[in-house]
Amino acid sequence: SQSQKKTPRAGFAALIGRPNVGKSTLLNALTGEKIAIVSPKPQTTRNRILGVVTRPEGQVAFLDTPGIHQAKGELNRYMVEAALSAAEEVDLVLFLIEPPQGETLDVTPGNRSILERLEKVGKPTFLVINKIDSIPKSKLLPLIALYGQEFPFAEVVPISAREKDGVDHLFQVVLGHLPEGEPLFAEDMLTDQQERVLVAEYIREQVLRHCRQEIPYSTAVLVDVFDESEREPRPGTPPGQLGGLIRIAASIYVERDSQKAILIGKQGQMLKLIGTDARKSVQRLLGAHVYLDLRVRVEARWSERAAGLRKLGYE
Ligand code: GDP
Ligand code: K
Ligand code: MG
């Protein structure tokens, strides 16, 4: 009959594109949860974050990747390689762009070089044009035609991740390109990222939010202590209320004493503010009260040194 249930589909898709095109925003719109951190600063995403979306029609596991950009220094190289290796492991690639700001319509050199590398990877690739809320509709068709000459895209899908416009449609089109199969992950699974990693990302988000001008994206946060010994809610805690207590100690790594001074602020005011805001979002994430102890450490030029990277967990 017409209403016969279709066989479910399942697979992996990578979100790839220049910094700030809206990859994390799209991942959050798709999962309906805050998983990847979003900020107006390029290269906010460090870790590959798997967001899993499960619907009756099927399941897609999305990899968010750091934006691809010119590789300068060890950290940047790490990020570029992470993005491209994500492409190797998935069933399809969602290549995100944003409409050009000015009058001229061009495939930017940055996007062209990504497409050249994606051609070698050889996975089915969608062109996802994000931020269509920011341009007149008349600009869309020429843009699609232009990119269509560059690369044999399997699909072209215009969206606004922020307005959640076209996001459901994108999900359905993605599913259509995935193999038939049962879900790969438990239905309630949202991400494979450990809580610790997410906690570090949430703290880093507040650092960037409050000190956007002064603190570089290369700032790292490392969770030193994650003590769950009192995590269990006390008996009789009403449902929906925060459970027990998790004690977290984390270090924010900067490269210069001057940056440390900014992060700490006058009489510790800035660090207190960052801690308060981070604690609120971490409490929501973990569903427990959180005691958060933040400190700032100076590790000169760590982002250029592979040893420093390994120590901070970027391998
Ligand atoms: P990423 O670096 O590719 O992960 O980009 P983010 O998701 O962090 O987004 C970068 C910036 O673009 C943020 O300020 C977002 O709010 C903004 N942004 C993302 N999606 C949209 C969209 O659909 N429309 C508009 N106007 N802005 C967006
Ligand atoms: K960003
Ligand atoms: Mg991002």
Image (cartoon, grey):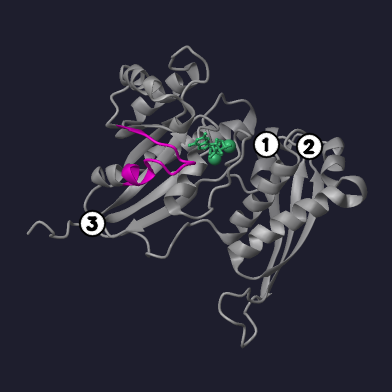
C-beta proximity under 8 Å, tags 2 and 3? no
Q: State the extent of the magenta-drawn residues as a range.
A: 156-171
Circle 1 residues within 10 Å: few <14, some 14–19, many ≥20? some
Q: What amino acid type is highlighted by mark number 3?
A: Pro
Circle 2 residues within 10 Å: few <14, some 14–19, many ≥20? some
- Residue 135 pos. (x, y %): 46, 25
Q: Residue at x 57, y 41 (%)?
A: 45
Q: Is residue 64 visible?
A: no
Q: Quadrant of the C terminus?
A: top right
Q: Earlier in the sequence, mark 1 or mark 2?
A: 1
> What residue does disc 2 label?
255
Q: Which mark is residue 8?
A: 3
Q: What amino acid type is highlighted by mark number 1?
A: Tyr
> What residue does disc 1 label?
217
172 sits to left or right of 159: left
- Residue 256 pos. (x, y %): 83, 36
Q: Earlier in the sequence, mark 1 or mark 3?
A: 3
Q: Residue at x 85, y 47 (%)?
A: 264
Q: Nearer the viewer, residue 101 or 155?
A: 101
Q: Quote the CA–CA distance across marks 2 and 3.
A: 49 Å
